[in-house]
Image (cartoon, grey):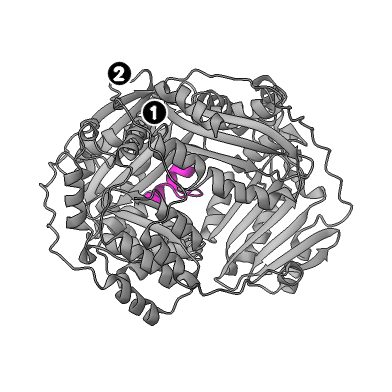
């Protein structure tokens, strides 16, 4: 019994993304492997799924305790648990969370685990979903060679009691330290009902990130801080949800009523006739983008198998959605989305109902990393089919030209009919603190020809996404979507940037929203540790995280100043990148007619320089937070950037700090069960004047923090 031989073998194939997950209706094992190792991978996997051998059981059980306890610190998980528990009184969707209940973990049975494996890990209950550079006929023959020995068995049929009707709203609340929010959930029929198609369209009509009713009427008009819809398509039932975050001084009941008011508009048919076609086109666009990679294609097959959907139904779903009429949507909404919902308020406070699983005494294991099983030796002896690497020649793959003084780079899209174009400025919030605020203000503005709402609708009609966003050192002006809409989109895109007009009311509402976001950020433990405290450790008090305008400074800014910053963006030196199917000369011609700022461009202002702190002695910084777990981040400055360190750092990370067979994972989780999550890395900066850093993270139960820290420091 050699620990983690699987990870050693799978890594030797060049596999990446090795993982597994369980949800309500499936357990999925994931690997991304080179096609030349397909046969060797099948040999390994057929062995893995042929027999269950429980190794390192008690330390891995402790990791499950850790995962359960971490869930007690996750307010979102608590909301979902309560919502599902009320929607599904009989079905495991609500009665049996994936991680289980606390009492389930107290007395686990190895016998029951074996019984589960023997019952469900049978070939007639499994699918192998593959997307990649393979020949289907030979692949099936190889699968038969390795998996054909598995014997099918009858799988118990799943039966459940129907859920009782919900005739009046069920109102619940949960307490926790994070920002307040509200979620509303409706239960409906499962995947084989046409109702699923209606709910998909309604979800997108309400929230699509651009022109949904919630997007425009509530978020765009700054009536709530954030709002969205969700739709969970499952075999037996489906769940439709709406969520919202309040603005300063706004009650959760107000947010709930505003969300439900948008649903009322659907029921009245009070939405533009073109919206259904537009949201279906948006779904097609998203699907086209997802299908660019093997992982998304494999997952599509996985869900089709699990949900027992015929593959032709999966492939033709967009065509089926196009047949649905507005009258059908309105009728469905009126019949199905009324007072039959569950509402869960997430309020600030101490959750007295937290169930913490007490850990048992753990005897550390001695892991012998150099031992090899007989199977490993057989596996290692199989000859490999080497592949010839293909290196990209950037000089030929990227076509470079000039548009006046503006560098233009082009890459041909040979996959689909979607384009992406960026205007890129080497100027961000380090160069000008106000630029981030101006960009945040931009989505709420219109022009002399369009209101802000009309602009969003226009882009959405064309199947386009438009955005401007900034980092510390860059501004990206972004346009993407259907190739056929490129010219119209470019005209609209340029018109918007040149003719945006100020809106004092929108700015006032935005400032109030920023103040609320900042207040909420102080309640976000991930942001506190991984952004605020990390920056403090690296830079001290004068850090990029704190390089922001104060609330007082924001309140003093005029709309006209921010609008001028937006209009002047392309008057600074910038470059243009295009990826699509149009001929580069055609793209340049369209740009020359519409992009006016091509000469006399200004230099970008110099950035603020943040000095990295030397880590010459050990120092500890602590923030108190109401949580079951303790999370630790260790950071040490290394040398200034050196390209000679890149391959060594990459090898160090693979060997020492990441993956199932890394030293950190094996010692801290596998051998000692001191943490659910532990990792370490040697990071490389994006700028040559910055330094490499060594960092380590441990997420553990508070009472094990001392032992976990000592173990990490020893390593």
> Is residue 461 shown left or right of residue 169?
right
Query: Around disc 2, counting alpha carbons within 10 Å, would you say few (fewer than 14), some (14 to 19), or many (20 or more)?
Result: few
> Is residue 73 shown left or right of residue 539?
left
Distance (Cα) linking label 2 and label 1: 12 Å
Residue linked to disc 1: 73
Query: Around disc 1, counting alpha carbons within 10 Å, would you say few (fewer than 14), some (14 to 19), or many (20 or more)?
Result: many
Question: In the rendered structure, which segment of residues is drawn in magenta?
Answer: 203-215
Q: Going from the N terminus, do you reach mark 2 or mark 1 first?
A: 1
> Is residue 353 shown left or right of residue 315?
left
**Secondary structure found at label 1:** loop
**Secondary structure found at label 2:** loop
Image coordinates of residue 564 in percent, x first then y, are 76, 39
Residue lying at 21% horizontally and 35% vertically, measured from the top left = 104
Residue lying at 80% horizontally and 36% vertically, measured from the top left = 607
Please say whether residue 207 is one of the residues in the magenta stretch: yes
- Decide which of 610, 586 is in the foreground and name it: 610
> Is residue 142 shown left or right of residue 642?
left
Number of on-image labels: 2
Considering only vertical position in the picture, is 555 above or below 28?
A: above
Image coordinates of residue 577 in percent, x first then y, are 71, 60
Considering only vertical position in the picture, is 386 above or below 193?
A: below
Residue linked to disc 2: 352
């Amino acid at each position: 019994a050699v620990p983690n031989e699987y990870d050693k073998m799978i890594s030797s194939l060049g596999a990446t993304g090795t993982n597994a997950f369980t949800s309500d209706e499936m357990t999925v094992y994931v690997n991304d492997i080179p096609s030349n190792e397909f046969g060797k991978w099948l040999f390994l996997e057929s062995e893995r799924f042929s027999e269950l051998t429980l190794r390192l059981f008690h330390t891995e059980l402790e990791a499950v305790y850790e995962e359960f306890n971490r869930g007690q610190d996750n307010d979102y998980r608590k909301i979902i648990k309560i919502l599902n528990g009320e929607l599904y009184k009989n079905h495991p969707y609500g009665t049996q969370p994936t991680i289980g209940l606390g009492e389930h973990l107290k007395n686990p049975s190895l016998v029951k685990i074996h019984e589960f494996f023997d019952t469900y890990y049978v070939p007639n209950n499994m699918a192998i979903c593959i997307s990649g550079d393979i020949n289907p006929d030979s692949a099936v023959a190889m699968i038969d060679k390795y998996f054909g020995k598995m014997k099918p068995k009858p799988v118990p049929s799943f039966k459940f009691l129907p859920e009782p009707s919900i005739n009046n709203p069920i109102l619940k609340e949960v307490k926790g330290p994070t920002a307040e929010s509200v979620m509303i959930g409706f239960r409906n029929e499962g995947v084989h009902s046409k109702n699923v198609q209606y709910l998909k369209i309604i979800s997108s009509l309400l929230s699509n990130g651009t022109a949904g009713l919630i997007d425009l009427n509530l978020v765009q008009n700054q009536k709530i801080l954030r709002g969205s819809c969700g739709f969970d398509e499952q075999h037996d039932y489906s769940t439709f949800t709406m969520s919202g975050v309040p603005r300063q001084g706004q009650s959760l009941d107000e947010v709930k009523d505003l969300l439900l008011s948008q649903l009322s508009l659907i029921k009245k048919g009070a939405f533009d006739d073109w919206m259904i076609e537009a949201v279906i086109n948006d779904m097609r666009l998203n699907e086209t983008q997802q299908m660019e990679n093997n992982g998304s294609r494999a997952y599509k097959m996985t869900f089709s198998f699990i949900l027992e959907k015929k593959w032709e139904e999966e492939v033709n779903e967009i065509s089926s959605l196009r047949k649905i009429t507005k009258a059908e949507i309105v009728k469905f909404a009126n019949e199905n989305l009324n007072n039959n919902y569950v509402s869960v308020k997430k309020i600030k406070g101490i959750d007295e109902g937290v169930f913490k699983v007490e850990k048992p005494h753990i005897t550390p294991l001695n892991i012998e990393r150099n031992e090899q099983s007989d199977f490993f030796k057989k596996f290692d002896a199989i000859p490999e089919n080497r592949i010839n690497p293909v290196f990209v020649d950037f000089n030929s793959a990227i076509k470079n030209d000039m548009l006046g003084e503006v560098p233009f780079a082009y890459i041909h899209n040979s996959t689909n009919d979607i384009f992406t174009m960026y205007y890129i400025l080497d100027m961000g919030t380090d160069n000008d603190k106000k630029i981030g605020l101006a960009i945040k203000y931009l989505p709420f503005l219109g022009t002399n020809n369009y209101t802000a709402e009309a602009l969003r609708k226009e882009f959405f009609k064309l199947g386009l996404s438009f955005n401007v966003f900034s980092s510390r050192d860059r501004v990206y002006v972004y346009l993407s979507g259907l190739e056929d809409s490129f010219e119209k989109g470019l005209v609209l895109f340029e018109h918007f940037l040149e003719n945006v007009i100020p809106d004092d009311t929108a700015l006032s509402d935005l400032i109030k929203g920023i103040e609320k976001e900042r207040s909420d950020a102080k309640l976000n433990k991930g942001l506190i540790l991984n952004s605020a405290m990390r920056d403090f450790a690296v830079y001290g008090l004068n850090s990029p995280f704190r390089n922001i305008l104060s609330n007082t400074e924001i309140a003093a800014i005029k709309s006209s100043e921010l609008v001028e910053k937006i209009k002047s963006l392309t008057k600074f030196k910038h470059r243009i990148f295009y990826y699509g199917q149009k001929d580069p000369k055609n793209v340049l011609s369209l740009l020359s007619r519409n992009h006016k700022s091509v000469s006399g461009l200004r230099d970008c202002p110099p950035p603020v320089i943040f000095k990295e702190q030397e880590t010459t002695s050990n120092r500890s910084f602590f923030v108190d937070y109401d949580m079951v777990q303790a999370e630790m981040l260790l950071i040490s400055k290394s040398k200034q950037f050196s390209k000679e360190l890149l391959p060594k750092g990459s090898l160090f990370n693979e060997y020492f700090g990441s993956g199932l067979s890394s030293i950190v994972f094996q010692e801290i989780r596998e051998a000692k069960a001191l943490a659910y999550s532990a990792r370490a890395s040697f990071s490389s900066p994006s700028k040559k004047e910055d330094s490499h850093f060594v960092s380590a993270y441990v997420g553990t139960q508070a009472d094990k923090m001392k032992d976990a820290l000592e173990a990490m420091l020893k390593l």
